[in-house]
């Protein structure tokens, strides 16, 4: 039986050598435990049964894309998700964020970076590999300034915009609570409201959608309320 303070990790990866590598990284830490593994989408029920706190998932699998089942796994378990893949192109990075990935690392990242990424994701952060971060920034800079909705039915509050700005910096719920002087529970309530208003399922997607809709501008550090 897993101790209450040990966080459970599940792996969705078809390459046995890489799966073993991730397992060894998890096993090297006393505060993490491997609860389930799967090598294809058809075995997703094994991951859900493991009730993970975090899912490590590849994208290219023998019977489809890990991104196709990511929303369902998160909805069924309430886990966070860290994509670890060999794919680093722009479209894949954006697709992962929109699917609900909470972080994005490349498989050739050092073990220490992967372990740190696991812990940061579990703590509410959003680790992104340098290459992926560059792609996201390039996409934002290349995009034309979006026109704002003339009459948004549910504009973001000032506090919600402040939270999105903090999340865009990759900070965690705890850090956001400390910066804003509110409790983590209050942060969680604001996040639920943000997700509902923007119709998203992850912080990365929330930031992306807020920028796309003209509600948030992170290119020069400023924000656009609403």
Image (cartoon, rainbow, N blue to C red):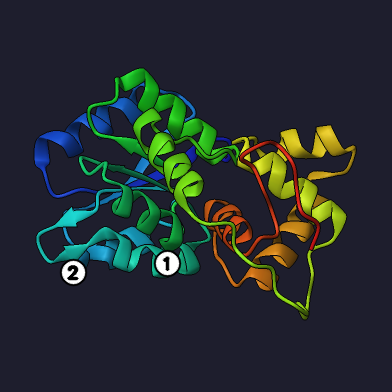
Label 2: element kind: helix
**Quadrant, the C terminus:** bottom right
Q: Which mark is residue 108?
A: none
**Left or right: 36 in relation to 39:** right
Q: Mark 2, mark 1: which one is toward the viewer?
A: 1
Please indicate, yes or no, whether residue 2 appears anywhere in the rendered image: no
Q: Is residue 169 above or below residue 140?
A: above
x%, y% of residue 214?
66, 60
User: How far, Cα to Cα, is label 2 from label 1?
Assistant: 15 Å
Q: Badge 2 is on which residue? A: 42
Q: Badge 1 is on which residue? A: 71
Foreground residue, 87 or 111?
Answer: 87
Please indicate, yes or no, whether residue 52 appears anywhere in the rendered image: yes
**Left or right: 107 in relation to 181:** left
Counting residues from the start of the chain, the first of labels 2 and 1 encountered is 2
Q: Is residue 2 above or below residue 24?
A: below
């Amino acid at each position: 039986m897993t101790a209450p303070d040990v966080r459970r990790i599940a792996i969705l990866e078809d390459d046995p050598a890489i799966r073993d590598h991730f397992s060894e990284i998890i096993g090297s830490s006393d505060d993490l435990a491997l609860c389930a593994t799967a090598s294809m989408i058809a075995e997703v029920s094994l991951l859900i049964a493991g009730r993970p706190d975090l899912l490590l998932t590849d994208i290219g699998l023998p019977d489809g894309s890990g991104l196709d089942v990511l929303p369902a796994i998160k909805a069924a378990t309430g886990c966070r998700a860290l994509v670890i893949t060999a794919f680093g192109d722009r479209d894949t990075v954006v697709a992962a964020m929109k699917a609900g990935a909470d972080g994005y690392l490349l498989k050739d990242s050092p073990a220490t970076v992967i372990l740190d990424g696991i812990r940061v994701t579990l703590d509410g952060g959003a680790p992104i590999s340098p290459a992926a971060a560059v792609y996201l920034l390039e996409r934002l800079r290349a995009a034309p300034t979006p026109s704002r909705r003339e009459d948004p039915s549910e504009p973001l509050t000032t506090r919600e915009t402040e939270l999105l700005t903090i999340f865009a910096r990759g900070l965690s719920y705890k850090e956001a609570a400390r910066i804003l002087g509110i409790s983590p529970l209050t942060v969680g309530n604001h996040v639920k409201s943000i997700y509902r208003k923007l119709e998203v399922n992850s912080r990365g997607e929330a930031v992306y959608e807020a920028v796309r809709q003209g509600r948030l501008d992170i290119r020069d550090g400023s924000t656009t309320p609403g």
